[in-house]
Amino acid sequence: MGRAEKGCPICYHKLPQPGEVLEPYDEELNYFMWIPGFEWKPKPVAEKEAYETERSHQRFSFVFANPLLLNVGEADEDMEEALQEMVENDEMKQKYSDKASGGKVSTSDAAVLARQLGLAPSYADVEKCAEQNGQQLDYSTFQQFAAQSTHPEDNVEDFVGAFAYFDPNGEGTLSVQQMRNILTTFGEPLTTQEMNIVETEFFQSKRVDYREFCTRVLARK
């Protein structure tokens, strides 16, 4: 009889079957995690592998987080052309001036301004900008930051792959609850309000075809 069994034979013999506790994203099943006093913190495979699509999760989240990208009937105008139009019409300059202090804005404020302009900067974009330019941006640097926040490289396959990770059987669909957990937990999580917008706009049944979902979302950009 081992030490664990001696310490709590009732608990030891009532350990659950592996299939009842193993989640698809667990790195491993530590069978002794159920023993009283044993502390175990499972690490998702996602943390170890970073999905290879972590940036997809980050960019994807801000597609939803930006209300301008969710408006029904939003024009399909190319984002780079739209950005140039904002500059020509002084819309960008006006928003920048309203937020600036001493002729500069912080990187966090720059991200907020970019989203107000209909762009989708990720946390990684903000961090990269701060590393290259510091925490305060003048107008010229802000324009460069905004231009880098259009993400023309976003594509359906990257985003589908991120959701497919949670679909081990390859069914092509996830439950609404699974979609909610993913979008409010991974990458740059959606707020409750943002998640409600997504559910109303995209989730019409209990199962969500995530390829169709990704296609529809990116079509709004």
Image (cartoon, rainbow, N blue to C red):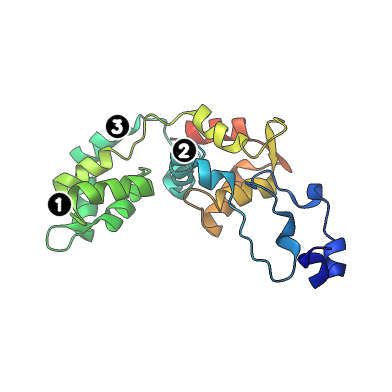
**As shown in the figure, which amino acid type bears the numbered disc 1?**
Asp
Q: Does residue 150 sit above or below 18 in this rendering?
A: above
Q: Position of residue 47 (x, y in %)?
A: 52, 47
Residue at coordinates 70% horizontally, 50% vertically from top-left?
29
The location of residue 66, given as percent across then percent down, is 43, 48
> Disc number at residue 80?
3
Q: Amino acid at mark 3?
A: Glu
User: Looking at the picture, how far across and down is residue 220, in whole percent?
Assistant: 47, 35
Disc on res. 18: none
Q: Within the image, what quadrant is residue 150 found in?
A: top left
Picture residue at 87% right of the left edge, 62% below the top? 13
Total number of numbered discs in the rendering: 3
Question: How far is disc 3 from disc 2 in space, using C-alphas?
Answer: 20 Å
Q: Is residue 196 left or right of residue 23?
A: left
Label 1: which residue?
Answer: 138
Q: Tell me which amino acid carries mark 2.
A: Ser
Secondary structure category for the residue under label 2:
helix
Q: Which residue is mark 2?
A: 56
Question: Can residue 176 be seen by looking at this rendering?
Answer: yes
